[in-house]
Amino acid sequence: MTAARSSSSIFLLLAVFVFAASCDAPPNPTATPPADQPTWALALHGGAGAIPRDSSPSLQRAHRESLSEALDRGRAMLASGAESLDVVEAVIRQFEDDPLFNAGRGAVYTHDGRHELDAAVMRGEDLGCGAVAALRTVRHPITLARRVMERTRHVLLVGEGAEAFADEMGVERVAPNFFDTPARRRQWLDYLATEPQTGDADRDKSTVGVVALDIHGHLAAGTSTGGLTGKRFGRVGDVPLIGAGTYADDRSCAVSCTGVGEEFIRHNVAYAISARMLLTGADVRQAARTLIREVLDPDVGGVIAVGRDGTLALEFNTQGMYRGAADSKGRFEVGIWEEGP
């Protein structure tokens, strides 16, 4: 056998092993949940690239209060026995109605002054997933993403087709100006005034996301975003791309990403965290830290993740990330910069 044929054979065997490990293998024995695992666990984010530390105390307080209210809602649901998927949808819907965050009502403006919304949801029990992109009149994109998962044989619907599906499903639609906010409009006008000749240079990292483990042992993840300020040409980021910005597998973890979407797409970050756990035996904190601190460039974004054993990971390489964490052991924390969970 020639050296070239030998190398090809080795590569083929390795590829088969990796595919089998990610699709068919039983849970890694090193990831067996400890006897004292939390009954439930929850993490959320409101985007990486947080407000400056010297911003007004009232603005800081408003963000912390919004994070706390969303976290408290999810905590109450999980503690009462709600399924993780229901919790993910409910908490993200709350974020989508909060003008402080870049999702739903607080969505940023595109280059031509409109809003285009994306969302995705995934269920760890059976890898069920659904996503939507380029929505302009759907009040709660996360709910429509769930309908795609549960009512169609598809994974991703976009634009006018997705909005027609919203009508068919009875999902609430609103006038496009429903998503307008004064703060986002000022941000858009500032962007237009300084836009370089080369095109989009804005590096917004804001998104909202939730990951949850319920008392039944099932994981779920969801993410929703208004995208980039000044985005053009129908740009779609990582959020609605399963495995890039959102992923959940009961054998490993649930993940939601926030940051420069193109980088999360290139590295398939959400799935890569799960794969590292299954293939190397790393826990969710180790896997998330490796992706954020060693694989991605600095100042790109962050992730929240919850492992099948209830361990929570909140990692970012930006100046901050709006985030919160809670579990049945009594943890309840929110943070913006390096302090907090």
Image (cartoon, grey):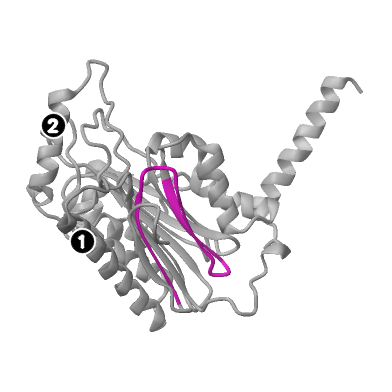
- Mark found first going from the N terminus, 2 or 1: 1
Q: In which quarter of the image is residue 341?
A: bottom left
In the image, what residue occupies the spot 31% across and 73% down? Answer: 72
Instruction: Quickly name the residue at label 1.
Output: 61
Residue 284: mark in rendering: none
- List the single residue furthest toward the front: 54
In the image, what residue occupies the spot 11% across and 45% down? Answer: 183
Near mark 1 (Cα within 10 A), the count class, few <14, some 14-19 or many ≥20, is: few
Region rendered in magenta: 302-327
Image location of residue 113, percent across then percent down: 12, 35
Q: Main secondary structure of the magenta part?
A: strand
Q: Which of 8 and 337 is in front in this view?
A: 337
Residue 112 visible (yes or no): no
Instruction: Quickly name the residue at label 2.
Output: 190
Q: In this view, does 272 lie to the left or right of 203?
A: right
| Placement of the N terminus among the 4 image quadrants | top right
Element on which disc 1 rests: helix
